[in-house]
Image: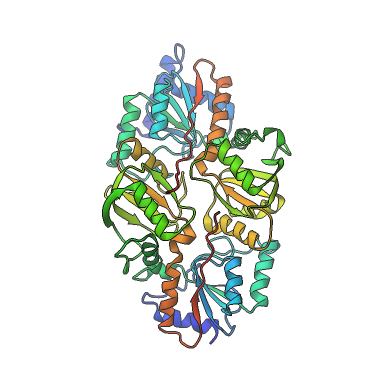
């Protein structure tokens, strides 16, 4: 597919919108509607925006996902959802550093073009919602919705269990394969859990680990938060840090996104497509 | 001999020009004027590792990774942190001193972290590897069988793999720690320590998943950051023994943190 410059894209989109807005819903119109609903600034330099496909395409259905892998795009096509809203990048990295000469990247572009899909990245603005559905979605998937301590915090007070038992519950509820890793005291009595989908910085860890018995995060860096949790364990603290994988941690929040879309875009169906745990452990 | 004198000897014997501007390779805790009774080399100055070094009478720690849970070992936000006080106190009370050697180890030829990583995963021919060692060819096998062998040989607990276990593989690209190399058209398998899963430099998790969808034989093996570079710290201890004599020099591994 020919890459379209942002300027010509804007012109094309504006023209397309004025021509077909009355009779059908194109991707540009859907996106403009959800931008209005979500509010905030949408700078062209931000991560959110169209990543592939023609924004003038008439939308038949919307799929939300944590990461638009080829498997997800195939499922979307089968489900007749041709606008895909993805939390993570589509073309391998923040900088999209692989060129069109890369066979995997070009095959993905080709799949999108052949199946008349449009991919839009929706990350910052969905995460910025004060309802913080990325966290409440994860809590709901874990069966902890009723245990939220405060409305404005992702802190949950769960029924008593050891760290090991809580990890087993997380594995089973989220259908995990090999991505979960835990550090700290296996026998710790867990009561307060902080949920942190996505990537967790050391500053948040230093501030909040002592308030809870467990942090469940998407991913951390090993020399930062994993190191901190290991040292806390050596210091005799009865806590545990559990990382479940970045995409796995974002899956449930993008499910809530599909539910929200149903209230904002009523003309076409919206659905969530799960990515699942990408990792397995060697035998 | 003081810790400062140990460091001066290391700088003098390091076969690359010393970069005094490195924010990593400097003292991290304790006094450089402390008399060294013994040296412990380690991958990361964990609290557990510090206690074992102290029990072995080794009061100078030479660490590859950080001590204070962030890469530049910035402690300005940690002054009131309970764990920081506990660990800093332990170092001070026991007359210990911590110095980091990261950037210069990776600049050396060979890069001991990579030499150690090849040895850990059971791939021959990595004895003179640099930080970017290039492709190594192994007899063709399935990705699943290869990953199982890596697990068996290394004994690492928390190895994570992405990709089709049935993929036929033979060309291996390996890198240390966070310097996990990007999957290339020539490589079948990338082995690394750690890498941001998505929205990072090159999102190889997604790339390898897409390769599997397209039937392209590719695999990703994430060993864990600490374990990937750990073995090379024994090579560093052996190297230091060639020019520092009369005090014990030992490799004291950091614990593999994951269950």
Query: Could one spot residue A10 in this view of the protein?
Result: no
Near-viewer residue (A47 or A219): A219
Q: Residue at x 30, y 32 (%)?
A: A2
Quarter of the image with the N terminus of chain A in it:
top left
Query: Could one spot residue A159 in this view of the protein?
Result: yes
- Tell me the quarter of the picture where residue A158 sits: top right
**B224 shown above or below B9:** above
* Left or right: B132, with A154 as reference point: left
The x, y position of residue B255, in whole percent, is: 54, 63
**A122 shown above or below B31:** above
Q: Residue at x 47, y 56 (%)?
A: B224
Near-viewer residue (B56 or A222): B56
The x, y position of residue B184, in whole percent, is: 31, 49
The x, y position of residue A77, in whole percent, is: 39, 24
* Left or right: A44, with B213 as reference point: right
- Tell me the quarter of the picture where residue B75 sits: bottom right
Q: Residue at x 36, y 62 (%)?
A: B118
The x, y position of residue B55, in whole percent, is: 61, 76
* Left or right: A282, with A149 as reference point: left
**A189 shown above or below A120:** below
**A29 shown above or below B117:** above
Task: Tally the marks.
Answer: 0
Near-viewer residue (A81 or A25): A81
């Amino acid at each position: 597919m020919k890459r379209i410059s942002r300027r010509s894209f804007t012109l094309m989109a504006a023209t397309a919108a004025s021509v077909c807005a009355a009779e059908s819903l194109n991707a540009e119109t859907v996106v403009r509607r959800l931008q209005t609903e979500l509010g905030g600034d949408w700078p062209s330099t931000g991560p959110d925006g169209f990543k592939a496909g023609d924004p003038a395409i008439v939308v038949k259905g919307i799929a939300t996902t944590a990461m638009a892998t080829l498997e997800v795009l195939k499922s979307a096509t089968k489900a007749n959802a041709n606008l895909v809203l993805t939390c993570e990048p589509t073309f391998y990295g923040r900088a999209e550093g692989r060129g069109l000469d890369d066979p995997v990247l070009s095959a993905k572009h080709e799949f999108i073009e052949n199946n008349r899909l449009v991919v839009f990245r929706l990350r910052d603005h969905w995460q910025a919602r004060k309802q913080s559905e990325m966290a409440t979605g994860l809590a709901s998937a874990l069966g902890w919705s009723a245990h939220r301590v405060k409305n404005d915090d992702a802190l949950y007070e769960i029924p008593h269990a050891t760290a090991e038992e809580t990890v087993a519950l997380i594995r089973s509820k989220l259908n995990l394969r090999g991505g979960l890793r835990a550090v700290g005291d296996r026998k710790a009595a867990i009561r307060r859990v902080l949920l942190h989908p996505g990537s967790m910085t050391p500053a948040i860890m230093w501030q909040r680990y002592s308030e809870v018995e467990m942090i469940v995060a998407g991913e951390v860096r090993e020399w930062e938060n994993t190191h901190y949790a290991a040292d806390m364990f050596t210091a005799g603290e009865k806590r545990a840090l559990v990382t479940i994988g970045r995409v796995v941690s974002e899956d449930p929040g993008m499910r809530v996104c599909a539910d929200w879309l149903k209230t904002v875009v009523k003309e076409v169906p919206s659905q969530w497509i799960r990515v699942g745990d990408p990792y397995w452990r060697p035998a | 001999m003081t810790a400062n004198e140990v460091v001066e000897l290391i700088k003098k014997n390091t076969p690359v020009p010393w970069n005094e501007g490195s924010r990593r390779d400097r003292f991290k805790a304790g006094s450089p004027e402390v008399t060294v009774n013994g040296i412990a080399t380690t991958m990361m100055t964990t609290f557990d590792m510090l206690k074992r070094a102290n029990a072995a009478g080794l009061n100078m720690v030479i660490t590859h990774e950080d001590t204070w849970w962030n890469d530049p070992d910035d402690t300005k936000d940690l002054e009131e942190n309970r764990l920081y006080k506990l660990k800093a106190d332990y170092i001070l009370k026991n007359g210990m001193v911590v110095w980091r050697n990261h950037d210069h180890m990776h600049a050396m030829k060979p890069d001991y972290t990579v030499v150690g990583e090849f040895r850990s995963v059971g791939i021959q021919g990595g004895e003179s590897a640099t930080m970017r060692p290039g492709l190594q060819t192994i007899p063709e096998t399935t990705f699943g069988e290869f990953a199982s062998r890596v697990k068996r040989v290394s004994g690492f607990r928390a190895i994570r793999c992405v990709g089709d276990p049935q993929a036929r593989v033979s060309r291996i690209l390996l890198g240390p720690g966070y310097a996990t190399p990007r999957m290339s058209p020539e490589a079948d398998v990338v082995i690394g320590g750690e890498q941001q899963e998505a929205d990072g430099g090159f999102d190889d998790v997604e790339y390898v998943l897409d390769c599997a969808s397209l039937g392209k034989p590719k695999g990703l093996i994430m060993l864990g950051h600490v374990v990937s570079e750990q073995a090379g710290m024994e090579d560093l201890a052996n190297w230091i023994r060639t020019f520092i004599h009369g005090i014990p020099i030992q490799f004291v591994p950091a614990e593999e943190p994951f269950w």
